Each structure stands twice: as structure tokens, then as C-alpha cells.
Image: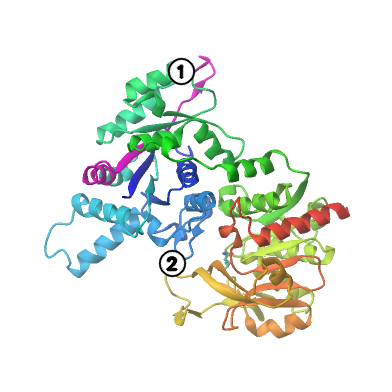
Amino acid sequence: MTRFVFITGGVVSSLGKGLSAAALAALLISRGYNVRLRKLDPYLNVDPGTMSPYQHGECYVTDDGAETDLDLGHYERFTAVAARKTDNVTSGRIYLDIITKERRGDYLGGTVQVIPHVTNAIKEFIGADIEEGVDFVICEVGGTIGDIESTPFLEAIRQFGNDHRGQVIYMHVTLVPYLAAAGELKTKPTQHSVKELRSVGIQPDILICRTEHEIPDSDRRKISLFCNVPEGAVIQALDAASIYEVPLNYHAEGLDAEVLRAFQIDPKATDPDLTRWHEIMEHVKSPEGHVNVAVVGKYIELQDAYKSMNEALTHGGFANNVKVKLHWINARELSDDNTDETFEKVDAIIVPGGFGEGGSEGKIAAAKYARIHKVPYLGICFGMQMACVEYARNVLGMADAGSSEFRECTDPIVGLITEWQEDGVLHQRGEGDDKGGTMRLGAYKARLEKNSLAQQVYGEVVISERHRHRYEVNINYKERLEEAGLKFTGLSPDGKLPEIVEIKDHPWFIGVQFHPELKSRPFDPHPIFASFIKAALTQSRLV
Ligand code: GLN
């Protein structure tokens, strides 16, 4: 039997519901259960693919090509369960499907309404595509209780509980703030939030109380009494030094045991094995030294825009038992004039993915500096594209080399991909096509050149990595770039799309057209990041 845990948030946003969901999943997995994680997002965009990273942080891409909420990244990193298209839905998607059906006449003259049509569609989504053997589905509802737009989702999860009695519990993540003037923690916001939840017919079974200070027993009793939950189900969630500590902290607070009890399962029947989390915390707490990595990006004010990359770099640090210190460099402010001073003290440079011309010259300057000074360089997607433009301009002397993403140029080293193959299926795109959901998205295979750095890093010849891009390095320039020393060491299986480039005469210079950061796990660091940090460590010892 599959059981469902619904997670809602109260009082304020940014309490880390996604992390709570991921940590609970990790704990249930540590007890031998099979878990899936899902997210319901109340906004009206059909998916986050068209949103600016400033609005919504990173867009996380799944193997099957869905552009999803960044919380799915937490889910995958904490569980290693690959997320799918069917694990994230928005109001926009639900309404789009319903309105498309309505226009087709599928409702046969009936009135189409929020209840039952929207709520039924949400319920269908919650229960769909769950394979045999899944013990728990943990389903997070985005937004905060009281938001107008979440109402249909709350109604749907309430109904779902009624439809599947005994198989559903509700967990509410709330804030217990500390008032410095009064010198005490306040439980009233939590009481109000639960009252709001109960007003839509949902009685939480478990409360996760985010707090900066220990919650005294008297306050726990108060919360338990006013919110109608057992005292043991008032889980204190103190701020953690590292996100990877959260599963251990929740376990110490009894969260996993409490969830099982809420389902009438004896927690003693399973023995949690938390070894991997203890090992990760060893790396967090006692690294042997550190490396300095410069991140040259354009959305640097909002680090959530690079969430998975930040985590993958941290994981690369775990693999080498060092701490990775990130130095955020605004690509718009970087040029050949200031690269020397900017990169003087860094051991490696990374240029992450990006869109649009803004900051591109700074990224090109970063690639140039890394090439000339033999500093380890990792270019991800846009970072690879700009490294190729740099090589064409400054090594091959093509002064007007560029990307057709910006404008027409004499040498479009990077151009729009109009056709590609996926398992024998041909995808085609044109200039004027819709922007949403039309990039080359999801996992594609690449073939690596034997004995290349890339192949040594992966230890394999055929790899599969996730993509999210509309442009690609133009294969027609392969020969000229290779002759000049920039090797195309990874190609799509049909040999038409460049996937990896590397500079032969350089200690570590790799550009990848895909996003390896999406597949890195704290307990299984991605080989590209492990190797990149190792190269940074070698570099740090040179200076
Ligand atoms: N803007 C580039 C493209 O669409 C790169 C995208 C990315 O870095 N994810 O191809």
C-alpha cells in the first residue's frame, strides 16, 4: 500500500519545506522504504522554464526533460531517486489541460468548475505514475497557507485524505520566532497558521517548527494543546549549519518515528541506517584545507539561481575532503582589463549556464584568462559556448566570432539547433517557435573520445547527461578548432552535436554542453566536479 504525506507551509515563505520533504524522504529510505517525492506549485506559469532565475531560482531539469521547481533538485540530491515529469505540476499546467479539453468540447456542454474539475485534476496528478512497490509519496504544496492561489490545492489534498482514509497524513512546516525584546519564543503564529489550515478542513498530524532557539517543553505543550497534535509530533527544527545535517537533526528529533506512528506503523520494526549522512557530515565538519573557486555568472545576487551547481561543487569538495570556497564574480563587470586582479587568488574558474548577451563578454574574458594562465576551467552549457567563441576569436583570429543567440556574426561558432535525434525520433525547431518547453531538454547520450580527459574523468565511453539549451557549438567549426588545439572529445551518438570540448595543452579545461550538476549527489559526487576540484587542489599547491 502506498501512503501519502502532504507537506504545507505556514507563517512565512522560505522555511525550507522542500528540504524538510527531502530530509524526511532520506530518513524513510534509510529505513528501507521506497519513496517518491512530488511538488504542487500554485503559480500560473505552466512550468518554471520560462521564469527568470531571479523570480524562481534555478530551473531543475529531469531525465525525461521536464523543467521543474528547484525543490526537485533537493529531492534528488537527498534520495538519488530520479524525478520525472509527473513529479511537479503547476496551476498553469492544470488549467491549460482543462481549458484545452473544454475548447475541444470534452465536457459535453457541462459547466467547468474549480470543484470538481480542477481539484480532480490535482488529485489525479497526485496519484498518477506511482510504480509498484512505492511505500510513501511525499507531496509538497508550494506557497504559504492563506495564499489565495493555493486554495484549490488545499481542497484537493483534503479530499484526497478523505478518498484514501488511513493512507494520508498532513505535515505542516511553521515558524516559531524569537522576540528579542521579550526574550522569548512565540507560538502564536503557529497557532494561527494551524487554525487557517483547519478552516479548510485539514488537521495537521505533525508540525515541523523552524526556530533559531531550542523550544522549551512548556512551549511544545502549548503548541500541542492549541494545535491539536500529540506532543511528540511537535518537531523542533533548529537552523542547521549545513543542509546535509537536516536528516540527522530530524532523526534526533524523532520525525521519521513520528511519521510512522501517524500511519500506525511501529518505528521499531525498521532500523535506520544513517551511515552515509554521518560520513557526509564528517566531510562538512573536518575538511583538510580548502580551494578557492571563482564563479563567473550573471545572476550572482541570487545564489538559488545556481543551486545545483553550488551543491555539486560542495560534493566535489567532499570527494577530495576539502572545503570549496566560492567567489562570486559578476560577469557584467569583468573584462580583460580586470581579470588579473579578479582571478589572482583563485584556484579554478567555473562559468555556469546562462541566457542572453548580458555578461557574455565577461565570461569570454574568464575563459581566456583560464586558458592562458592554465587555471582549471569548467564551462557549463553557456560556459562551454563562450569558451569556444573565445578560442575562435583569440586563437584562430576570427575577430567576429560569436553566438547567433545574440545577433548575426561572421563566424557563428554557436548557432541555433534546429534538428536533433532522440532514440530515433527527430526533433525540429524554428526561430519563431514558442519559448516554453521547446529547448533541447532532458537526458541525452554522448560518446567520449578514448583517452581524452573527459573519458578519463568519467571512466566510461558512453555517458548520459541532462540538457537545457537552444543553441549549440557549430559542428562545422570542429576541424578548425581542433587543429588549433580545442578538441571535441564528446559528441552526440550521431556525431552531429558537440557535447564536450577540452584544451589538450592545459592541465584541466573542459566545456560541457549539458548540466552535470543536476546529477551530483552528496554521497555520490559527480565525476566532473570531483575531478575539477581535484584540479583546483593541485593548482592551489602550485601557488
Ligand atoms: N543560452 C544558451 C542556449 O540556449 C545556453 C543555455 C544554458 O546555459 N543552459 O543554448
Q: Residue furthest left?
A: 109
Q: Position of residue 235 (x, y in %)?
A: 45, 29
- In the picture as drawn, the residue positioned furthest to the right comes out as 543
Q: Quadrant of ligand 1?
A: bottom right
Residue 217 badge: 1
Magenta-highlighted residues:
156-185
Q: Position of residue 69 (x, y in %)?
A: 46, 53
Q: Earlier in the sequence, mark 1 or mark 2?
A: 1
* Residue occupying the point 68% across, 49% down: 318
Residue 302 to residue 467: above or below: above
Q: Is residue 284 above or below residue 183?
A: below
Reading the image, the residue beneath label 2 is 437
Q: Amino acid at mark 1?
A: Asp
Return the residue nearer the eye: 337 or 453.
Answer: 453
Residue 506 shown left or right of residue 111 in the figure: right
The tag on residue 64 is none
- Would you identify the image quadrant in which residue 94 lies? bottom left
Question: Mark 2 is on which residue type?
Answer: Gly
**Residue sitting at 41 percent across and 61 percent down?**
85
Q: Secondary structure at mark 1?
A: helix
Label 1 environment density (alpha carbons within 10 Å; few <14, some 14–19, many ≥20): few
Q: Quadrant of residue 281?
A: top right
